[in-house]
Image (cartoon, rainbow, N blue to C red):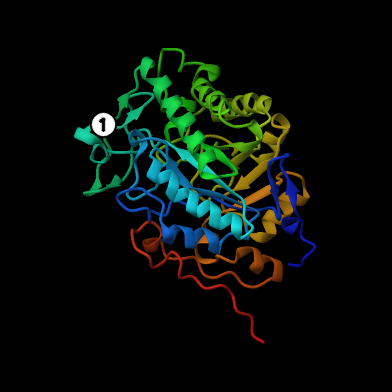
Amino acid sequence: MSQDLQLLTPFTLNPFLHTRNRIVMAPLTRARAGLSRIPNDLMREYYCQRATAGMIISEATVVSRQGIGWVDSPGIYSDEQLEGWRQIVNAVHAAGGLMLLQLWHCGRASHSHFHEQGQLPVAPSAIAIRGDGIQTPTGRESHETPRALHTDEIPKVVDDYRQAAKRALQAGFDGIEIHAANGYLIDQFLQSKTNQRTDQYGGSLENRYRFLDEIVRAILLEMPAGRVGVRLSPNGNFNDMGSPDFREQFTWTAEQLNGYGLAYLHVVDGLGFGFHQLGEPMRLSEFRKVFQGPLIGNCGYTPDSAETAIREGHADLIAFGRPYISNPDLVDRIANDWPLAAQAPMDVWYVPRSDGYTDFPAFRPHT
């Protein structure tokens, strides 16, 4: 690797977002926000350590109490959470970084133990996740059958996203990313496997896309399209996802999103997070045909494969997730062809403690 890598060149997404390189820190749920779900000093240190990324996309951040589905993940639905994030964003900016907030609602990938009065998680349809269970505040539990949202409840959920985007802007974020991937609520609406509604939010490709479209439109009332990205995962089986018509649905979705002039489309095209085996996986080249804005590839990329994807025009930026856990200086390691640290063990990824979070050292070359 050398300094002539395309991966290390600046990239202008639009008048609002200019990156100093094409390396994106992918959103990584790390479960360090505590019971209050208020971003804290430890999180500020963590993000500042990684501020050399061309762009940081924050860990998934719930837009409402209803959206909670992870232990100790952060929120953006209170003034205290807004202020906690403000301290982080200010510090990242002071370090020369660019940072967007990923907006999240877990939908059926939640449990009644997360909710007041033991209320069931919500979803487009009352279809439970098939899997090994979910980690709750009281320990691992079996997945529950969620409650299907009533049609007249959906505008409130859409407005939660709008309010979250407004708070993100107030906190100083450079933009937001709508998390429409990995089997969470928006993805559940998009996919026929989890959406069996008979109202205007189910049935056709257009109707299943409607929920995401309403969220995009609501957020654009608060910020320009050039500050809004969307994340999709057409190939993934995480959270028991995967639909026979996935190619038609995600092609349609990208075509519709193309009309908004968004900051980017972030596609989990790699298969390292699981593959549903329902056809040939969708590649970035397919999205390039229907989405003319910037494309971010994600999942399982190495520095070499990332460079190839950019040089061949399939992607404009590449997001790295797991490598950023144990390589806070990932950009410097790639630029200098220094070895990457071994992947951090999974038992430190999502635990509410300080070790395994900010204690990974930067590379020190021998002199």
On screen, residue 250 versus residue 143, left or right, reads right
Relative side of 41 to 302, left or right: left
Q: Which residue sits at x=47%, y=58%? A: 44
Q: Residues within 10 Å of mark 1 (few under 14, many from 20)?
A: many
Element carrying mark 1: loop
Residue in front for this viewpoint, 242 or 146: 146
Toward the top, the furthest residue is 199
Location of residue 240 by image quarter: top left
Extreme residue in the bottom direction: 367
State the residue in front, 134 or 72: 72
In this rendering, position of residue 201 left or right of residue 329? left
Q: How many marks?
A: 1
Judge whether 309 appears above or below 249 on screen: below
Considering only vertical position in the picture, is 236 above or below 121?
Answer: below
The vertical placement of 6 against 80, above or below, is below
Q: Quadrant of the C terminus?
A: bottom right
- Residue 219 seen from this side: yes
- Where residue 212 sits: x, y (%)? 52, 26
Residue 193 spot, x, y in % from top left: 43, 27
Task: Please tell me whether residue 197 is drawn above or below residue 70 in the rendered image.
Answer: above
Residue name at image x 71 percent, y 42 percent: 13
- Which residue is located at x 23 percent, y 31 percent? 119
Residue 207 in the image: state x and y as whole percent. 51, 17
Res 276 visible: no
Amino acid marked by disc 1: Leu
Q: Residue 118: where, in percent of width, then height?
A: 20, 34
Report which residue position mark 1 lands on. Answer: 120
Q: Residue furthest left?
A: 117
